[in-house]
Image (cartoon, rainbow, N blue to C red):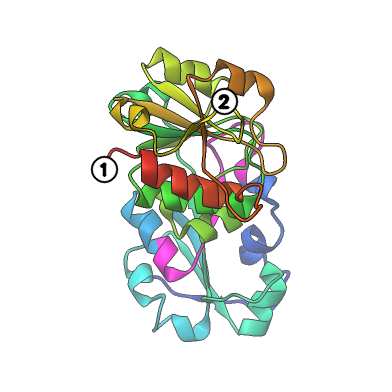
Amino acid sequence: MNTAIEIKDINHPDAQIFSRLTEAQLCDASQRGCGLFIAESPKVISVALDAGYEPVALLCERKHLSGDAAQIIKRMHDDVRIMTGEREVLSAITGYRLTRGVLCAMKRRTLPTVDEICGNARRIVIIDGVSDTTNIGAIFRSAAALGIDGALLTPTACDPLNRRAVRVSMGSVFLLPWTFCDDPAGESRRHGFKTVAMALRHDSVTITDECLKREPRLAIMMGTEGDGLDYDTIKRADYTVKIPMYHGVDSLNVAAASAVAFWELASH
């Protein structure tokens, strides 16, 4: 049975993993797919454990030891550090007030290969340069919920295991296989996917076009928050697809657009 360590000081050495390490330091920026990440809230931590991620340390408010965190702690090996303290101390350590009172540091896993992701997939998403953590989390949540089989991200896209992205996704980043790739559009075509560039252009086909649903394999490409997909990416795509807009609205946020695209184009 794990014995909780009482944390009374922001400088406590056992709490450094939560208070001192930046996202880049946690990840070990020199190598994608190694290092640590932080999962927040009992539900998200449970999803990560179910997906096979290995916990290293857990930090929670004292009241959660016998409450929300109790079942999580029972699932952890004896070498996992369990730390607790008052809400004010934990807020000072983490830099913000915990909404669910529980954080868990977990080991990253080796990312799957493009071949592993694309092998048996029918619908994947290509995330091209999307850098906002909230958008990344929302895209993953929609992708997992609406039938997308995997995700390929360009190196300039946000890390899906960023703390906020994990929280916004409600753990969906653990449910969908994903990896970084220098040329996701080219790699997807090599695996027999037709690429779909989401862009509002005069030569776009509407997202409800039946020809899209008949395609056995589609790679849906979502671009950056401000500029969207670049011209060359759109030009090389097999399809340029638009979501019709009304009332003079020029476009949807990339997270909202992805949800619409996944619902329409996933192989239900």
Is 206 contained in the magenta span? Answer: no
SS class, disc 2: loop
Q: Which mark is residue 203?
A: 2
Quick check: 19 left or right of 238?
right
Q: From what the image shows, is residue 125 above or below residue 41?
A: above
Where's the N terminus, which quadrant?
Answer: bottom left
Depth order, front residue of 201/93? 201
Mark 2: few/some/many CA within 10 Å (<14, 14-19, 20+): few
Quick check: 143 left or right of 258?
left
Give how far across and how far down residue 199 sits, in percent.
59, 34
Give how far across and how far down residue 268 sits, in percent.
26, 43
Residue at image x 40%, y 55%?
48
Q: Is residue 73 visible?
A: yes
The stretch of residues the image draws in magenta is: 27-45
- In the rendered image, the residue lying farthest to the front is 247
Instruction: Tally the numbered discs.
Output: 2
State the image quarter where residue 147 is shown: top left
Depth order, front residue of 241/228? 241
Q: From what the image shows, is residue 2 above or below residue 220?
A: below
Is 43 contained in the magenta span? Answer: yes
Q: From what the image shows, is residue 45 above or below residue 215?
A: below
Q: Is residue 173 visible?
A: no
What's the residue type where badge 1 is placed?
His
What's the residue type where badge 2 is placed?
Asp
How many angstroms separate mark 1 from mark 2 (CA)?
A: 27 Å
Q: Which mark is residue 268?
A: 1
Q: Which mark is residue 36?
A: none
